Amino acid sequence: MKKHKIYLIHGYTASPDSNWFQDFKKNVAKENIEISILKMPNSQSPKLNEWIDYMEKFVKEIDEQTIFIGHSLGCVTLLNFLSTFNIPKISALFLVSGFVESSPIPALTEFVRPRLNYNYLKQLTSTRIVISAVDDDIIPYEYSKTMAERIDAKFTLLTEGKHFIDRDNFTEFPFLIKEIKKLLND
């Protein structure tokens, strides 16, 4: 049986040990599921080219069993990465509290400058899900909704969760775990 590979790309100022990432890994990892939470370089002062180069080095064997999860800045980074390379099909794309085309955080505007190939991104997988929360106080949910519209993704707006970060005591993400398990059991 072929392994499912899940790549999780964290956001600005985060690390693989931040937020809900380790709990997610603990609850989803199985014999046939390998999870890599990338440690994006210089997350306090990120540069798009450094993040893309890093992903190019550490994201291997992308195929129809590959699931990508982006959180916050990790979403637009992931979309830039996928748009840059001629990747065939993937299993799924989950984007949490992300943004494209404009950023509410001025330090991150270089990440939204490249024009994304939305048609290509739509063809990568039929499972495209964007998740945000009504009370997100860092990336207002309207930014995530725009991202969902651009890639024709299912938009899920949760009633609470803010930006899904540990600073707000968000260290578990049962909704995402349930969605991933549902996908893997199909």
Image: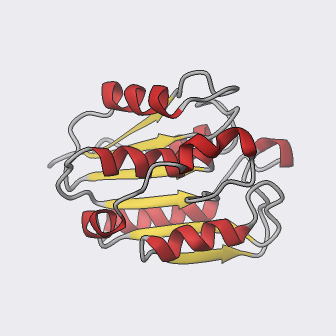
In the figure, 51 relative to 186: above or below?
Answer: above
Q: Is residue 63 rendered to the left or right of residue 11?
A: left
Residue 27 in sight in this render: no
Location of residue 112 in the rendering, given as x and y in whole percent from the top left corner: 55, 50
The quadrant where residue 102 appears: bottom right
Q: How many marks?
A: 0
The quadrant where residue 139 appears: bottom right
Q: Please tell me which residue lies in front, 181 or 155.
A: 155
Location of residue 41 in the rendering, given as x and y in whole percent from the top left corner: 54, 22
Q: Please tell me which residue lies in front, 113 or 52.
A: 113
Farthest residue in the top direction?
42
Location of residue 46 in the rendering, given as x and y in whole percent from the top left corner: 61, 29
In the figure, 93 relative to 165: above or below?
Answer: below
In the figure, 35 relative to 49: above or below?
Answer: below
**Residue that appears at 63% across and 50% down:** 72
Location of residue 171 in the rendering, given as x and y in whole percent from the top left corner: 72, 46
The quadrant where residue 159 appears: bottom right
Residue 34 in sight in this render: yes
**Residue that appears at 67% across and 37% down:** 12
Q: Is residue 182 rendered to the left or right of residue 44?
A: left
**Residue that appears at 40% across and 57% down:** 116
Q: Quadrant of the C terminus?
A: bottom left
**Residue that appears at 49% across and 44% down:** 77
How are the colours assigned in the image?
secondary structure
Q: Is residue 79 rendered to the left or right of residue 160?
A: left
